[in-house]
Every structure is written in C-alpha cells, then in structure tokens.
Image (tube, rainbow, N blue to C red):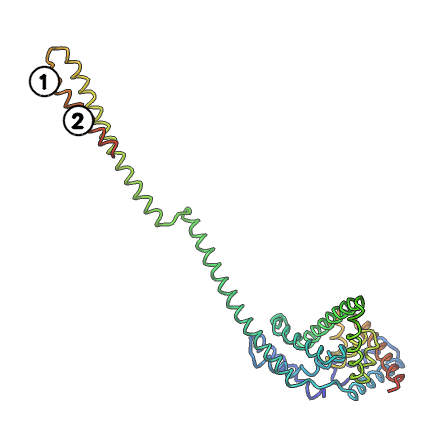
Amino acid sequence: MTENKKENVDVLLSKFYSAGEVERIKIDITETDRLFEKFPAPQLSQETIDRIKLQISRKQKRIVFLTILIKTAAVAAVVIIGAVLLLQDTGGKKPADNYAENGYQAALSQVDSSIAALEKEIELLRSELFAVRLNEDNGTNGILAEQVGNVEAEIIDTENFFWKG
Amino acid sequence: MKKREMASPEKIEDIVLLARNGDKQAFSRLVDIYSTRLFSYLYRLTYNRDDASELLGELFLKMVEKIGSCRPETFEPWLFRMASNLFTDYLRSKKRREKMLANIEEQVEPETQLSNKNDVMADKLTRQLQRLEPETAEIIVMRYYSQLSFEEMAQMRNEPIGTVLSKVHRGLEKLRQLMEESDD
C-alpha cells in the first residue's frame, strides 16, 4: 500500500519526527494496511453497479436536454435583444408603421385642401347674397327675390355637402 | 487489490477528458475503476451496506454533474473530496435524526435494534474504527482507500501537511491499541 504513494514517506516523516518516531509511524502504517487487508470491506454487488450506471445514463440525458434548452433560450434572448436594439435605431417605429403613417398624412392633406376650397366657395356665395340684398330696395324685387332664393338654396346645398364631408 | 485497480494517471486523465465531453462509456469506465474503493471507504465510515450503496450512487451522480469543473490531473483527490463531503453531510443528518428520535422514546427502540444488528454484522476492524472520532476514522480510511499521498491529502483537506501527519499518526496508534484490546 505504502509503495503506491507518489512520495517518499521516510523523507516526509523525517521532516517532522525523530528517527525513532519515524520508525514507529512506519510500523503503524504497515500494520494498519495489514489490518485492512485482513478484514476486507464487503464486496459491492454487480446489481448496485448496474443501477448506478443506469442512473448516470438518465442523468446524462437530462443534462443534454437542459443544455439544449439553455442554448435555445440564449439564442432566443440574443435575437430578441437584437430586434429591440434595431427598433431603437429606427426611432422605435417599424417600417410598416411608417408606410401607414405616410398614407394617412397624404389623405389628411387632401381633405384639408377640399375643405379650404368649399370654405372659399361659401364665402363667395355669402358676398354675392350680401350684394343682392343691398339691391332689393331698388325696385327690382321680382327677379332679385328669385335670384336670392336660388343663391340661398345653393348655400344650403353647399353647406350640407360640406358637413356631410 | 490496490495495485491491480490502480490505473495509470495518464489513462485516467484520458478517461476523464472523454467523460467531460459526455462520453457514456467513459463514465461507465470510471464507475468500474472507482466503485469498489469508494464503496469500501463509505462502508468503513457508515458501517452500513445500504447507506454506503446509497451514498455511492449519490456520489457518482454528483461526479456526472460536476465533472466539467474538475481538472483531469487532479481527478482522484477531487472525487475523494466529494466522497468526504458526502460523508460529512451524512453524519450531520444522522446526528439530527438520532437527536430527533431520542425525543420520541417509542421510536428509539427500533432504531437502536437496527444499529446493534449492523454492529454485529460489521467486522472487527469496522467496529474499532467506529470507536474512533469520526474525523480520525475518516482520515485513516481515506489514506488507505484513496491511495493519495500525504501531500495530496493535506491539499484536499486544506490543512498543513504536518497536521495531517499528526492526525494519521495518532489515529493509527489509537486504532492499533483498540484492535489489540479487542477480545474478539
């Protein structure tokens, strides 16, 4: 047993003990080794060894599964972080959102210009109506009244059209 | 027995490297090489075949789990340190269990009977080892079964080599004395 050690026991012991003590310790070591050989521990059954190997095999499978799971989760996390960083670079808006927003703004500006045109027309009609009313006291009531009626109808129509959109 | 089981360090390192890469056969080989020595080590300290078998299974599962953190050239001290830690945990839980059972008188009896039965079944050396302080018994059993040098044992236990030598020396002396005094 002692010869299996990878060190020189004599040299080691002599650093700490006297020559007499070294001899006594060496005898104790040899005697104890002899006792261990005289009273061997019971044999381990093959059944136990097989059971342990089976447990190891199961454990290895679990470790492989967990490793794959962790690697997948890590890759997913990297992809998500990359996507978030990319979105932050483009001002937090997706390209699709930008296209939608551009179309919406174009439609709004078109509606705005239509409203402006209608408002201009209403203003023109109002001034015409004002001029006609001024001429009513000049004795041309019949034709003027008809014209006034037509203009008012046109104003109502235009306003209705405007509010209907 | 020891010389036959002792594989060359280079070979063990190769097997450990394969095991670290998840090689099933390498793990199986490590079980074949170390199971007898480790079982004997655990049996001498627990004085119980079932407990020793259970701890052995637990130890090899820990080995599979943690082999990535082990350097192949220090595999043996690493493995026996894990065995030593497992035994320490076992001892603590056993003490807790005994303390708890001591408070429940009716449950103490079957436990005592079981313990006595184990004593009868154990050999003379195992019984005398049981009479030593657990730490002293552990260091003697470790020295024999691990085949580690005193220097490796000192490193493993985080103790100066002089302290380890002193504990081994006193332990062996006491064990020899107990064996001589024993009448069976």
User: Label 1 lies in what chain?
Assistant: A
Q: What mark, if any, has residue A154 been given in the picture?
A: 2
A86 is higher (above) or lower (below) than B156: above
User: Label 2 lies in what chain?
Assistant: A
Q: Residue at x 20, y 29 (%)?
A: A158
Identify residue type, mark 2: Glu
- Is B184 situated left or right of B87 in this image? right
Q: Residue at x 82, y 71 (%)?
A: B163
Q: Residue at x 48, y 62 (%)?
A: A75
Q: Image quadrant of residue B154?
A: bottom right
Q: Classify 10 Å Cα crowding around label 1: few (below 14), some (14-19), many (20 and above).
A: few
User: Percent position (x, y) of residue B95?
Assistant: 78, 69
Q: Image quadrant of residue B17?
A: bottom right
- Is B73 situated left or right of A3 in this image? left
The C terminus of chain B - image quarter: bottom right
Is residue A72 among the parts visible in the rendering?
yes
Residue under label 1, please give it.
A143
Name the residue nearer the viewer: B77 or A143: A143
